[in-house]
Image: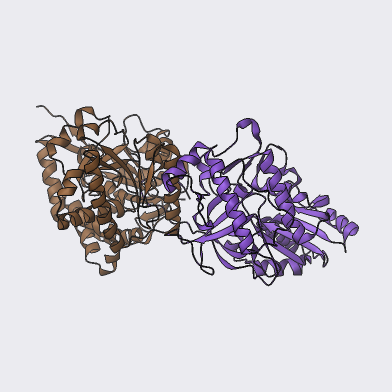
Amino acid sequence: MLDYLIPEQEMLAPDALVQQLAASPLQEPFTEAVLTFITELSRSILMDRQLRGFPELIALAHWFRPSQLQAIKADFELRRCGKIHRPRGLVFHIAPANVDSIFVYSWLLSLLAGNVNLVRVSQRRNEQMRHFFSKVNKLLRDRRFLALRQANAVVSYGHDETVTAQFSSACQMRVIWGGDDTIRQIRAIPLSPLATELAFANRFSLALLKSQAVIDCGSEALHQLAVDFYNDAFWFNQQACSSPRAVVWIGDAAINQTAQQRFWPALGEVVSSKEPDIEPAQMMDRLAAVFQYAALHEGAKVMDRQYALLTRIQLETLTAEDRNLHCGNGLFLELERKSVSDVPSILSPQDQTLIHFGFEKQDLISLLPDIPPHAADRMMPVGKALDFDVTWDGYYLPFCFTREIGILS
Amino acid sequence: MSPIDFDQPFAFAKQDKSLHLLDGLNYLTSFHAGRCIAYQRMLNAVYGGVLQPGCLEEVPYLPVRLFKHLLLKSVGDEQVVRKLTSSGTTSQQVSQIYLDQETAQLQVRALASIMAHFIGKKRLPMIIVDQPDLLTDRSAHNARAAGVLGFSNFGHHHFYLLDSEMQVDWSGLEQFLACYGGQPILLFGFTFIVWKYFYHASRLTGRKFDLGDQSILVHGGGWKRLQDAQVDNATFKQALRQQLGICHIHNYYGMVEQVGSIFMECERGWLHTPSFADVLVRDPTTLQVMPFGEQGLIQVMSLLPRSYPGHSLLTEDLGAILGEDDCPCGRKGKYFRVDGRVPNVEIRGCSDVRRI
């Protein structure tokens, strides 16, 4: 019934699994055992030459390297200001259907916080994740990590709401990563009254480029900008929530046009040299989306339609429908605004990351009073859009995964 | 535009055909641009205006998938006589095609013109390899019902082979053959249904038939599920001949977005373009037109669609054009093969809204 990815060869039925997890003791946040486990996991991935071809896995292992773990711990100590934090208990993580690695961040951060974890992953999985599971399982065979083995499970199962309901009623916290429909469906399944929930929904992200700053770039700086932008946009084929899908040019019309004429060819060169994997089916998705945008927007203008690796379409506005229509694959919705103060009116609650170039921090902070709720959970410089952070969608996860205990004597 | 010549669908060689076709397609581009705002906007945004090019390769096209996402029609609601939808077994959304009287009539005439070339002008006793209860609502049809309805025009004494549970009416078949055995018989069905519910059922129940050397099967609807079962056209033909004694088998390539102007398989096994329709093959990544012989995305063009802007469509099927005007079967026009759908790839990203 349950397909166990972690621990290996486990056979427990859902109710027995819940019982075992509920009986597992919670740990203090950042115990040595957990830090050692994650450090060794990270090392085993980074040291394995066979895994060099899996950049997501390498990035993941790199993110959980020892110095980063120490930094997360130090930051946590600083933030808690001497207050006492304890883990919440059993945390039920629901991973998205098609971003393989995101559940690992969710799971390991919750583990660091001292929780017992039950993770549901989709039934579809790729080679990269199989390697990850095998590394974890190998480590869990070690007697030092026996307690972790009993306190963590990663499972998959078919569309069975009764199992999800069972896990939901047993957990102290539910974490959902997924599309809007998934989140709605899962939210309809009740939690126990004391339990809490975090939901990471589908998001959209935009790049804000200051046209004058692009014009002012020397050829080397322009190339670097293009490389950084390429990494943000094409690493997950523009399908990560944080990948820039719209580009907003800030400046006067003539300046914007000059900046576009510099930027896009520079990006085109980088894209051609990197040869991202875009399959014919993805090309068709992109092409159909381009036509749909054109049908929805009077005055839209498609640029570079026949360019194999990226397409731009110039629009006047950006609606919720436009955001939902976007399917990645190298398609950029292009808008122009005179000043950065015109940006808040474009934004919607769906917008997660503003990827910026050419602005001062003060320019960015000045946007905040006028933006809609949830909009701009992060503002990252070009090149850093996809960096995972312990604060995600506005939630500082180490606090979310713990509860603060007030003690007065 | 000049009227379509339905008398000789395979008589015109490149020179005559392409001029007439280009003329008609250019007319349809501006006709629809003036009547369908979404189409006009797409032409403006993507092609920079209402193009009237001097060659077929530059006729604007739409991705066929758009009919699943956008309501595209060039006539008022009061002129719509029928709505066609794709079967949509695998995707959640279906194509919606709105027909007016004129388009519906053109479709009937086009299909008749092509079929006459393959089965003659006389109606034949006909076996429909499907259920009789597909055609309940005459104002809306899915692709299967539209196919059955369209092809039943070429038969008489229609015998529906399957019941509503998709079981073969064996005794009905025997009675039909007792009446018409030895005469020319027309059979029509969808490729997968013929294979699974007729051929396989007869194998499983150990029944062999001889439908006679004048039996003709016309079948279409795609090979996807047969490809999954590793059945190709040659295997299909041989199996049906052996088990059921069907002698003449013609596949056709067609789609609900361009009903009527279908591409029939000739005696040599190639799909043929009639004079009022054509195909191009485009590179899947650059969208440039590819030379004959090379595999790419098939673009289909047809002079029939008057009520919706579907006269030039880029499909998601892969295939190759094999030649023009020189098929050994003697028919003029381009001939081509279809190799299947563009393979789906795994979608990555957080959005799991779209399932494939």
Count of numbered tags: 0
- Residue B353 shows up from this direction: no
* In-image side of B12 versus A329 (left or right): right
Determine the image quadrant of residue A177: top left
Q: Residue furthest right?
A: B179
Residue B101 to residue B248: above or below: above
Residue A379 to residue B124: above or below: above
Which coloring applies here?
A: by chain
**Which colour is chain A painted?**
brown
Residue B3 to residue A371: above or below: below
Q: Residue at x 29, y 69 (%)?
A: A50
* In-image side of A21 versus A293 (left or right): left
- Residue B25 shows up from this direction: yes
**Which colour is chain B painted?**
purple
Q: Where residue B259 sits in the image (x, y, percent)?
A: 65, 49
Residue A386 or residue B168, whichever sits in front: A386
Residue A368 or residue B308, whichever sits in front: B308
Q: Where residue A407 sits in the image (x, y, percent)?
A: 13, 29
Q: Residue furthest bottom?
A: B328
Q: Where residue A168 sits in the image (x, y, percent)?
A: 38, 38
* In-image side of A55 versus B323 (left or right): left
Residue A145 or residue B43, whichever sits in front: B43
Q: Where residue B250 sits in the image (x, y, percent)?
A: 71, 62
* In-image side of A409 versus A195 (left or right): left
Residue B7 or residue A368, whichever sits in front: B7
